[in-house]
Image (tube, helix red, strand yellow):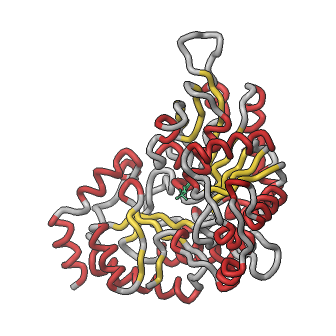
Amino acid sequence: MIDLRSDTVTHPTPAMRRAMYEAEVGDDVFGDDPTVNALQERAAELLGKDAALFVASGTMANLVSQLAHLGRGMETIAGASTHLVEDEQAGHAVIAGTAIKQLSEDPDGTFDLEALDAAFRDPSDAHQAITGLVAIENTHAHSMGQPLSLGYTRAVAEIAHRHGVPLHVDGARFFNASVALGLTPRQLAEPADSVAFCLSKGLSCPVGSIVVGSKEFVHRAWRGRKLVGGGMRQVGVLAAAGLVALSDGPDGMIARLAEDHVNARRLAEGLAAVGGIESAGGLAQPTPGPPDPSRTTTNFVIFRVRGDRTAFLDALKSRGVLMVAYNHGTVRAVTHYGVSAADIERALAATADAVRETAAPPAATPTKADAPTQATAATTATTATTPAGTAAATALER
Ligand SMILES: Cc1ncc(COP(=O)(O)O)c(C=O)c1O
């Protein structure tokens, strides 16, 4: 199988497996695990912050960051389509007892800076919650994994700090952003007060995420981690993989992310040439028509199929390629360690076959008004699964 569903499907490298086997361990709740301590020191150094904390997942990294930055009843300002808002079971409300004020994003993954400035609450008004945090997502998943620039991160931080509020970066794929932008992780992290990043995505570790920030922030996050049941014991066996991933040498996993970005772009270019594959619409690609390969700047490719999406994914699977149903009726493919340039060519051939088997015919002369948007996406997805669509796909196959 060529598994393009996510970069979370990556397996640990041979160097990681060796390091995990050989890891020195201790009880990390006592702070005794030397491998965890080394990983946390390395992460803090790499991102230019005072301290770091190893946690179980990206969701936990965001949660303990919110617990550390916010008191109950406070409010975070964040992009409406971010993981923090959409995909964490409202942990901010359930566990941290906070609200989120959502700002809509543009297709470059940013929200408007004037809208941000205007979104801060008035603490002198007893009706209002108190704004306590601004959060951005880098790379920004729903915009097809766009990396947010250093200039934008600085501008957001400047506004947040002017209002006396810290900036948190959900950097689940932070290293994809720094590699795509040609910046060191330290440069890109500099404006932020805290950064969360995942070891278990493009960096190929089996488990784990890290949050970095000031010593005081990390101390509070460490207390939060225990609160949510995230205190782990001889967890150096997992941290060892992270140390390999963040290393500078040939076993390190950061620089090689560039290869994933090249493969993703090639996939996007190939898909653009396959009839029956269309723009994702919405934030991922606002312009209608064929997929625009220039939207792929990191390791995400998001598109829409003209026919039945489930049938397409099944047809693709039967040809040894996995992609995944994504938001608003789209399909997502993500490149990662273990997927080679040759795999991309095989995936493209399989996609062309699967589309031929399942695609509906093109709609009559599309107009600008037909451009898929997030609002219409759900409808499009529904209509695409009608029996008429299936019959048309069969006709096309012949
Ligand atoms: C932007 C972003 N943040 C956070 C997470 C959460 O990571 P995890 O699945 O490790 O909880 C994800 C996972 O896909 C993500 O894409």
Asked whether 108 or 46 is in front, the reply is 46
Q: Residue at x 18, y 62 (%)?
A: 386
Q: Quadrant of residue 171?
A: bottom right
Please provide percent x and percent y for residue 125: 60, 10
Please provide percent x and percent y for residue 237: 66, 72
Where, quadrant-wise, is the C terminus in this rendering?
bottom left
Q: Residue at x 44, y 61 (%)?
A: 279
Asked whether 361 or 9 is in front, the reply is 9
Q: Is residue 8 visible?
A: yes
Q: Is residue 108 visible?
A: no
Q: Residue at x 75, y 67 (%)?
A: 35
Asked whether 207 or 303 is in front, the reply is 207
Q: Quadrant of residue 37?
A: bottom right
User: Is 218 drawn above or below residue 250 in the view shown?
Assistant: above
User: Is 265 drawn above or below residue 302 in the view shown?
Assistant: below
Please provide percent x and percent y for residue 312: 31, 73
Asked whether 313 or 203 is in front, the reply is 203
